[in-house]
Image (tube, rainbow, N blue to C red):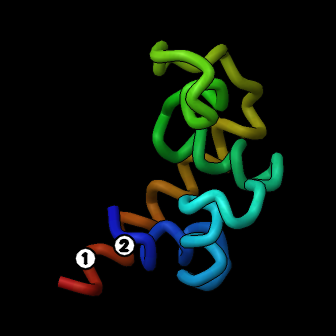
Amino acid sequence: MPQREVAQLLNMSQTGYSKYETGENDVPTAVLIKLSMFYDVSVDYLLGLTDEKNRYAVSAHFAEDAAKMKEHSRKSHRKDN
């Protein structure tokens, strides 16, 4: 997924998101959680601490947020094409 689209999901600029990917800025916990939910992987996996992608079971609140993010991404992707 292009940085621009991920940044939109996180309500931030592409430049700001790029700084997370390059390691110039640390990724805030809230962003790590959102990325984990969106990509359906563990935060440990995102941080490179494990090769295991599976997440732990999450609360209904976080699952609802992840579903909203994925739906927003699908709508944005359709609009761009």
Residue closest to the eye, 46 or 74: 46
Residue occupying image coordinates x 30% and y 74%: 77
Residue at 43% across, 71% down: 3
| Label 2 crowd (10 A; few <14 / some 14-19 / many >=20) | few
Q: Classify residue 64 by image quadrant.
A: top right
- Number of numbered discs present? 2
Image disc number at residue 51: none
Tag 2: residue type?
Lys
Q: Badges 2 and 1: C-beta atoms under 8 Å apart? A: yes
Residue furthest right as drawn: 29
Q: Out of 54 and 47, give the one closest to the viewer.
A: 47
Image position of 18 (left or right of 70): right
Q: Is residue 35 left or right of residue 61?
A: left
Which type of secondary structure does the marked residue at label 2 adopt? helix
Viewport quadrant of the C terminus: bottom left
Image quadrant assignment for residue 12? bottom right
Q: Categorize mark 1 by other alpha carbons within 10 Å: few (<14), some (14-19), many (20+).
A: few
Residue that badge 2 annotates: 75
Residue 79 appears at what percent x and percent y?
28, 85
Residue 60 lies in what quarter of the image? top right
Q: Secondary structure at mark 1?
A: helix
| Residue 78 relative to residue 47: left or right | left
Disc 2 versus disc 1: distance between alpha carbons?
Answer: 5 Å
Amino acid type at circle 1 is Arg
Q: Is 2 drawn above or below residue 39 in the view shown?
A: below
**21 to 54, vertically: above or below:** below
Quarter of the image with the N terminus in it: bottom left
Residue 69 screen position, x and y as percent: 55, 58
Residue at figure coordinates x 26%, y 86% from the top left: 80
- Residue indicated by mark 1: 78
Please, is residue 21 above or below residue 56 in the view? below
